[in-house]
Image (cartoon, grey):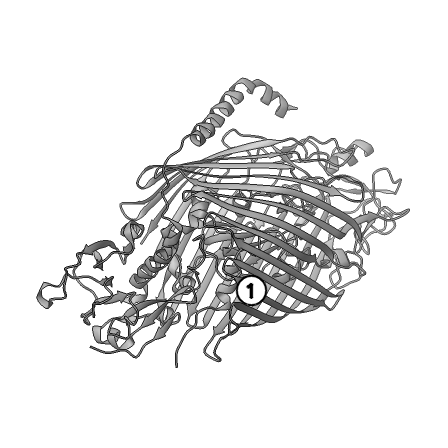
Amino acid sequence: MCFLERKRNDLVHTIAIRRLSWLFFCLASLLSSQPLYADGESVEYKIKAGYLYNFTKFIDWPADNYKTFNLCILGTDPFGSLIDPIEEREVFGRPIKLFRLNNGYSFTPNKLAYCHIFFIGEPSATPPTLHNQLTVGESPGFAQHGGMIGFINQDGRIKLQINLAAIKQSGLKISAKLLEVADIIDGDKQ
Amino acid sequence: MKTNLTRTVIYLIPAYFYAGMTYAETDVDDFFAMSPAELAAMPVTIATGTPKPIFQSAAVTSVITAEQIKGMGATELHEVLETVPGIHVGLQGSSYDYKYSVRGISNNTNSQVLMLLNGTRITTPFRGTLVAGMELPIEAIEKVEVIRGPGSALYGADAFAGVINIITKKAKDIDGARVGVRAGNWDTESTWGQYGSQWAGWDVAGSLQYQHTAGDKGRIVKADAQSLFDSVLGTQASLAPGALNTRYETLNGHLNLQRKHWDLGFWAFNSIDAGTRAGGAGALDPKGDANTEAYLGDVRYATDDWADNWTFSTHASYLHTYYQAAFQAFPNNTLLPIGADGNIKSPFSGNPLVLFPDGANAVVGRTENIPSLDLNADYKGLQNHLLHISTGFRYEEIVANERKNFGTGIINGNQGIVNGTLTDVTGTPFVYLPDTHRSIWSAVLQDEWQFAKAWQLTAGVRYDNYSDFGGTVNPRAALVWDVNEQITTKLLYGRAFRAPNFSEQGNQNNPVLLGNRNLHPETINTYEWGLDYRPFSSLRTEVNVYYYEINDLILSVPDINQSTSTFQNAGSQNGYGTEFEWHWQWNEQWDFTGNYAWQEATNKVTNMPVNGVPEQQVYTAATWHFLPQWQLQSQLNWVGGIHSAPGDNRALGDYQTIDFTLRSKKLFKHLNLSASLRNALDERYRTPAPIQLPENLPMPGRSFYFEASVDF
């Protein structure tokens, strides 16, 4: 019976704590505010953002002296803020940093920003093969026209087209995990 | 040649579960956590934007991620499962391991719930549940996927009330190294290491966790099974009042290797010197100890290089389990009525009394081996159809051992006094279970048909042939309609079965419970309607309504003019109910999640409510992200309306527990800290116990722990 007695002695105390706990829950659920998540149609770009993050892990990046891992979005930015949380992540101890380069940015050799990954939002741009830098795009035929990795929508799923020759030329090495879900493209080598 | 391995069976099985992903899963962070293959399998065409891969929405499911597990402060699997709508955690009959009732469906050994590890069956045929003593630690888990409802059309036997699939961390999830330690009251300590990297073209993940606890010594029972003998026979042998012996010490390791086409897994679990909880026969037994081992090897190969539009895959696995317990069924100086068959009889039976100065002791063990092989093919050459065909073989075997100083073939009631010397009855007709084996062939056919833009019909059927009881066919159908961007609705039907297990078929020489070779499977037909409503993008709600009918329930039925019961297909049950859940991201600081479940299950033999399962459950959690790297989560779990059997007056009431967990991530980039207060109000609640125990069993009181881990 000690169990019941103890309960009786502590009853007032217990009730007070219970009321406080309930209050905490009720208060919290009374409040209201703005949505945090992006809209439904952005799933496509969340998948692409997921791939971009995977590229940081499944590609062998040669050693360099940059303090950050630079991910550049060139031209029109289709991601908006949904990709921003990638900056909370790291690649082999280096934080990822996002750069949005203007539409006017051009690949003039001596003015190149050092971007580990270039996401090229411009449909018209024909990307150069850059040493140790990865070019990623979503325009039709991106990989065929010299880009390294192109996103394509295949039966409602986002697949990769990989231009191995261009990647090889850049000096990067790509993991089998990526090749596994990709079409290998015999593209221009530039 | 084009390599276009878009889907493999490795992702097929988990994908079945993605259907019920919570809204939080659509957070971009969850996409960062996916592998290339998972991303490639994720459809973008569904207007709702909810990720719904392959077998989308074909069941009512819940997914709990490692992040959510950490947030709620859980350190053992049962704490995670208690938060799932419609699932309630209780204790099994003789092992006192945890069991999970789903929607009012529950039995003594948890055999109506199928448990998988990375898609591989880890329940064993002895009692259709996990090997006794398996207290699974949590650090290696990446997510837990739960189907509430039938799954036999895909998974076969025992996917009856629900399916629980534990997915462990792979190389991409660990991505580096992590070491951690945790310490709390009840002498509870845990330490773990994890490593994920690439090696010789393989993605390699390894993890090892050690955990021990003395258990809550405050779980006192005032009377035990010996107390009844004492009161009738005038002895004083019972060790009650005393605490349940819930100590354990476990080692748990996982190894996973993945590369193109291949996925290799190895799992080892070892529990050393675990306490026997309420005792092997319901009499307190502080010295009893049990040892458990489980080893699982998995090899998966998948390719779509062989033929256009086809994906072929195969999965071979081998599960080996070992259990050995040395315990006192009744304590020193017990005086027990012994029948001519050597078994312990009722204190009122008038059988000759035998004194056991060293107690009634036993060493009981078993080894189980379960190899299996599956061959799968998926065809996507028909427009709007995805066909899945598979065939499988599984072999199940058990070898039992037993040494005792009482029982059939050992004593006959004329001894007067029996000392502690044990007699080995292993391999004799007097052992508790004959060595048994059976084989199972199966075939699955399923089509996923997108017959209109927003409509999908999944229809499948599975045939299983058991070498002991024969064949069974289990179909299912799921119709899913994306009404608009905010609403998805679905209608589900499924039939499932539970195979009689070796204990129900072959129990022998037991004082109370005998097996029956003529059992056939329990069956269940379930109808469900579900609605997923996202009124605005930060709020997701889900509601479902279900009805089920169970036939041929396997129950122990008292034998006429005998003191024993025999398992028979004698029960039937129906039930209906509803589950409602919500996930609300209020702002960057606060999010709320929770669920309410109500069920009305009826025993159709007695027309009374089903015993031992809650009619109502409430779970709510509030998380406050008060600094960029810090969060505080509080959660409340309320359980109500558990019925006792008629005439069972043992105390049992509604209860609520409240937990608080404070957590920080990546302090100084590498350090994670956590502190948790569990059952903060020290609610001393009870869970239904087997009828031979004078009291329902007290559950753990307040506890706390501190945890630190470092990522490299």
Q: Given the current orientation, which residue lies at the most extreme right position?
A: B561
Residue A36 or B623: which is nearer the viewer?
Answer: A36
Q: Quadrant of residue A161?
A: bottom left
Name the spot of residue B270 as percent of width and height, x first.
54, 55
Up the image or down, B279 lies above or below B253; here it is above
Up the image or down, B184 lies above or below B434; here it is above
Label 1: which residue?
A: B448
Q: Answer left or right for B76 relative to B342.
A: left
Q: Residue at x 81, y 60 (%)?
A: B518
Q: Answer left or right for B22 relative to A125.
A: right
Residue B48 or A15: which is nearer the viewer?
Answer: B48
Q: Given the current orientation, which residue lies at the most extreme bottom position?
A: B1
Q: Residue at x 45, y 52 (%)?
A: B48
**Quarter placement of the C terminus of chain B:** bottom left
Label 1 lies in what chain? B
Q: Residue at x 53, y 37 (%)?
A: B619
**Quarter placement of the N terminus of chain B:** bottom left
Q: Amino acid at mark 1?
A: Glu
Q: Answer left or right for B660 relative to B152.
A: left
Name the spot of residue B312 as percent of width and height, x first.
52, 74
Q: Is residue B285 visible?
A: yes
Q: Is residue B76 visible?
A: no
Q: How many marks?
A: 1
